[in-house]
Amino acid sequence: MMRRRAAVGIGGDDSGITLVEVILYVALSVVIGTITIMIFTSSLTGQSTVTSRTEATTAGDAVARGLERALRNAKAVSIEDEGATLKVYTSLETACQGWRVRAGELQVSTTPGFPESSWNTLVRGEAATPAILPVIARDPAGAVQGSALPFFSPGTQVTYALSFATTGDSVDFRGSVSSRAARAPMGTGC
């Protein structure tokens, strides 16, 4: 013979969920939601770091190629403002080329005489874009060569050292270039 279970609760039915089960479901949902948000935030931060580094590398590579090309074809070179400005008179189509680092920005000019109004900002020193910071060039033994300024000329070569800041590690570009042409005073042409 079968026995019937006694009715529990108001309606006499014990189906449904208890308060303890509700609390467990809420706690489990909070844990899963927290983990999901952490993974999403981490991937966005990683993407931002990679994007910033890629932008800095692209900008730095273009600057380094332009600098080296102008310096290889230089007829005259002038380093001014205690190493913060490099002016080059070249045999290229754009004969006058100048680069300067000022207030964390890399500025360029291709106007003869390099008037103040001719300098255009190539890379700004803002958090969203790479900033230019001078770095100290070192020889293979680790000894400092030159100064902490972006441009200097130890002898017949012109050396540049630029660091493009990113949201992660900075991207450094360094090089030394010798001109193929005989040097002349900067007053010639530019």
Image (cartoon, helix red, strand yellow):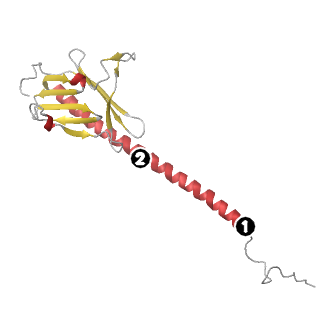
Q: Is residue 190 left or right of residue 101?
A: left
Sooner in the amino-acid sequence: mark 2 or mark 1: 1
Q: Is residue 78 left or right of residue 43?
A: left
- Kind of element beneath mark 2: helix
Give percent across and percent down for residue 80.
Answer: 19, 23
Give percent across and percent down for residue 65.
Answer: 24, 33
| Residue in front for this viewpoint, 34 or 179 | 34
Residue 67, quarter of picture: top left
- For the residue carrying disc 2, how many other residues have a C-alpha within 10 Å: few (<14), some (14-19), or many (20+)? some
On screen, residue 135 above or below 105? above
Q: How many marks?
A: 2
Residue 164, quarter of picture: top left
Amino acid of disc 2: Ser
On screen, residue 26 above or below 9? above
Q: Which mark is residue 68?
A: none
Image quarter in which the C terminus is found: top left
Give percent across and percent down for residue 31.
Answer: 63, 56
Q: Which mark is residue 21?
A: 1
Give percent across and percent down for residue 77.
Answer: 15, 23
Residue lying farthest right? Answer: 1
| Residue in front for this viewpoint, 66 or 106 | 106
Question: Which residue position is annotated with label 2?
Answer: 48
On screen, residue 73 above or below 33? above
Amino acid of disc 1: Glu
Residue 92, quarter of picture: top left
Q: Residue at x 34, y 23 (%)?
A: 136
Q: Residue at x 73, y 72 (%)?
A: 17
| Residue in front for this viewpoint, 5 or 79 | 79
Q: Is residue 3 left or right of residue 108?
A: right
Q: State the separation of the CA atoms marked 2 and 1.
A: 41 Å
Q: Is residue 38 left or right of residue 129?
A: right
